[in-house]
Image (spheres, rainbow, N blue to C red):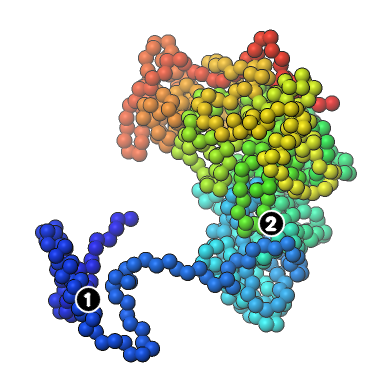
Amino acid sequence: MTPSPIRRPAAITASPSRPCAPVTARTAPLACSVLVSCVAVAVAVAAAQPAPAPGTARAPDAAAVAAPMPVPAPPPARRVPAPEDRPYPGTLELEVDLTDLERRVFSVRERIPVAAPGPLTLLYPRWLPGNHGPTGSIQSLAGLVVTAADAPARRIDWRRDEYDMFAFHLDVPAGVTALELRFEYVTPVTAEQGRRTVTADLLGLQWEKALLYPAGHYASRITLQPSIRLPTGWEFASAARVAARDGGRVRFEPLSLERLVDSPLFAGRHARRFELDADPRGPVTLNVFADRASQLEATPAQVEAHRRLVAQALALFGTRPFRRYDFLLALSETFGGIGLEHHESSENALGPGYFVDWEGTASGRDLLAHELVHSWNGKSRRPADLWTPGFDVAMRNSLLWVYEGLTEYWGLVLAARSGLWSEAFARDALAHYAASYDTARAGRQWRDLQDTTHQPIMAYRAPLAYPSWQRGTDYYTEGLLLWLDADTRIRELSRERRSLDDFARAFFGGRDGVLGPTTYRFDDVVAGLAAVAAEDWRGFLRSRLDSTSQAGPLGGLARGGWKLVWRDRPSAFTRTLDAGQKRVSATFSLGLSVAREGGRIVDVAWGSPAFAAGIAPGTMLVAVNGRAFDGEELLEGLRQAQRDGQPIELLLRRDDRYSTVKVEWREGPRYPHLERIEGTPDRLAALLRPRG
């Protein structure tokens, strides 16, 4: 914003009819003397004014009006009460109508009992578990009307808090024993508005989007009775337990607000269930919803791989920290992608080819493994600074490299042990991650791994112009490489007798059917590792977490018996990853990736040859060496530059301007692979091998 010019001389007058001359370019040399004269006259005029009558306030002078003053905070009675470990009196009733598929709107009716008249604050959930940040979608709440439950015509006014936009204050009148709330949760109808959760064929309900709750209580001490109304003929799945069903109306058993938010719901017209483990101590079910019934056709071998996933996870941790577990899996072109953990379920969304294009969609098949692991790492046990008593209390993320990084590691390992991935495919994934941090993450020079754990609070999953330099959620895959390093180190120290599996069972095992969370701190992680193998684990972890070395974290690969090498053909992992993202990748050569349709450059690696040539994300790649862009033409251009030793020539369009740039790269296509280090133990094969 451009600051306003100073107008003080024009505002202070010597007399009602003769203002002082304003400062202009022509009169600037006299500005100081004019201003002094005006101020002197103003003081004299003010002194000559009669004193105000007793009880009458004098109008402030212009200088006082212009000076900024802090606005005092609201009185304590209007502030949001902090959560306390005490039960809320009575059970809240929550009804969510999910039938408006055309307008993509959820209609909510909520009944909140009140014990006494007086001030009451209602909150919309803001700090959400699994998101690790303040991601509550308050902007999607609309139409809020509060009335007395026993007198619906008696409307009760609410006032949004001046400081906390997620808080609503109201005064409960005498004689009112319960409030009735009606409002809508307006879901995104386009991708630009957010993740789409309602389509013509399936939907997802995260309960925290469709409720308000009374402030001043732990979320675990507020009880709700939820219910839904489904579209005709639809099926659903949720970790919340059903009390009664009558057609499309479903009533669930009462549960705490904490558990309700941890029990989302998927529903759809095309659904199928696969029992993965029938053990009554904690059965596991895969609930699949799809755009079309044909997309649900899983082969026996595919189902068996998911059964082995559960078996391998149970073998790793040794216990079931859930009463039952429900995978919620959506297969869709239009339903928004997601992978979000909950204690007894997980929300997962992948493309429609998950079963019917099994090989082509392989790169996403570790998602269910990752989310299942979170039942132990993240839900049963959670970092102490990530646990909060309510959804209005800020989280801290210092241990996300354990919560997410270790989970990402075991997700890859379990995908391989179960057969969802082959061992070779898992090695390809490790090669891709290792190459990303060794050659295409310039941001490691200034931002260490520990600092990336703040990213969900700074900007949750926000698109970055240059992620290789800015760094985003690197605590996932760089964290994976850290834990590979730790696993291979334990195996080395113990002469192959112990591994990170022993840490998993001891640290996260818990007890069957006992829901958490219990919490842990950095010192607990250090002690847990030391109990498995003697080592300076504090120094080991901190040297990797706090490093700003440009060299990538490849120690675990080397100790595992493998090294990073480059070849001119992509690995199976790279091929399926690029196909799934509908892009052509030259990340490890030119340093850019391009959308296959339309030629938009979606990423440019900081410091790469493309970056040095002045290419920026968002630019359109029109032609390569004079030929219209397509994926094959870009790869052929790389090969031609290698053959003739000439730079590759790109025709670009940025807004309404065209330009031609030459990119200096003569090594041809380059893709990461792993190669055995002769004469060393193959610890990587050992850790990817199934247990039992």
Identity, as a three-letter code, of the amino acid under mark 1:
Val
Residue at image location 38% in from the left, 30% down from the top = 615
Identity, as a three-letter code, of the amino acid under mark 2:
Pro
**In the visual, does 59 lie left or right of 473?**
left
Q: Secondary structure at mark 2?
A: loop
Q: Residues within 10 Å of mark 2 (few under 14, many from 20)?
A: some
Q: Residues within 10 Å of mark 1 (few under 14, many from 20)?
A: few
Q: Position of residue 596 (x, y in %)?
A: 49, 30
Compare marks 1 and 2 and give the one earlier in the sequence.
Answer: 1
User: 22 or 575, which lies in front?
Assistant: 22
The residue wearing badge 2 is 389
In the rendered image, which quarter is residue 308 located in?
A: top right
Above or below, 370 against 116 in this view is above
Residue at image location 68% in from the left, 73% down from the top = 179
Above or below, 687 against 668 in this view is below
Q: Position of residue 75 (x, y in %)?
A: 54, 72
Q: Position of residue 230 (x, y in %)?
A: 71, 57
Residue at image location 63% in from the left, 37% down from the top = 401
In the rendered image, which quarter is residue 373 located in?
A: top right
Q: Is residue 628 visible?
A: no
Considering the image in quadrants, where does the C terminus appear?
A: top right
Q: How many marks?
A: 2
Q: Is residue 456 visible?
A: yes
The residue wearing badge 1 is 43
